[in-house]
Image (tube, helix red, strand yellow):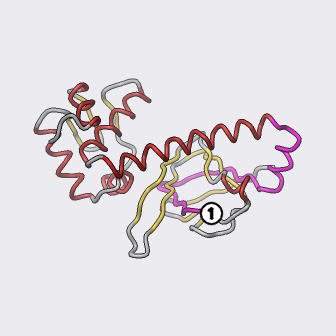
Amino acid sequence: MAGTRHFKANQMIFQENDPGEGFYGIVQGKVKIYKSSPLGKEHILHIFGPGEIFAEVAVFAGRNFPASALCLEDTKLLFFPRKQFRRLISENPDLGLNLLGLLSMRLRNMVGKVEELSLKEVPARLATHLLLIRENLGKDQFDLDLNKSQLAGFLGTIPETLSRVIRKMNEEEYIETAGKKVTLLDISGLEDLAAGNLRL
């Protein structure tokens, strides 16, 4: 049922308002889901990696894609056509329930992100992001998988502002950075920043 598709780095998979004919699973690579404003400003909604699926809304809604998808690196995808997958769901209702559970989780995450972008300042957003990576990886030192421009877009700011915040966090010894490597030095301080109890 699924077909394999290969994309190069910076190649579009689909654009906003393209027909939603199915969804994708990532075998290898990284995909950015984003929306662009009429003025050309880009806002990153999600970054997906191996083992994750995206564009699954098309399976249920049968509508156009609500955002655009771009490969951040050479990427191998599995494409699941909507009609065949809907037929499979009708034959296996548990599969549909699992997919609805995933959609519900994505919706909760999106609501949380909207709250962060509207209520938190950039240092709080960055601290929240770094603490989430720490929670997912289970360690205080890790490599960021996004470059500065991509991370700025994901956090709803511009690279220059992000650079100033990172430099200030280094100076005040919340974190230590070397290239893409980040070491979290003051976890409780980062938690206070994320909660808005402290300001840089």
Q: What residue is drawn where x is 38% and y is 68%? A: 41
- Residue 160 x/y as whole percent: 21, 58
Q: Is residue 107 above or below residue 157?
A: above
Position in image of residue 119 (x %, y %): 32, 48
Total marks drawn? 1
**Magenta residues?**
65-93
Task: Give yes or no for residue 24 being in the magenta stretch.
Answer: no
Say if 54 sits above or below 176 in the image: below
Query: Label 1's element?
Result: loop
Q: Nearer the viewer, residue 179 or 32?
A: 32
The quadrant of the image that shows the C terminus is top left
Is the residue 37 above or below the residue 8 in the image?
A: below
Rendering quarter of residue 150: bottom left
What residue do we see at 15% from left, 45% from top? 167
Residue 68 rendering spot, x and y as whole percentages: 54, 63
Residue 47 percent coordinates (x, y) = 48, 49
| Residue at image mark 1 | 65
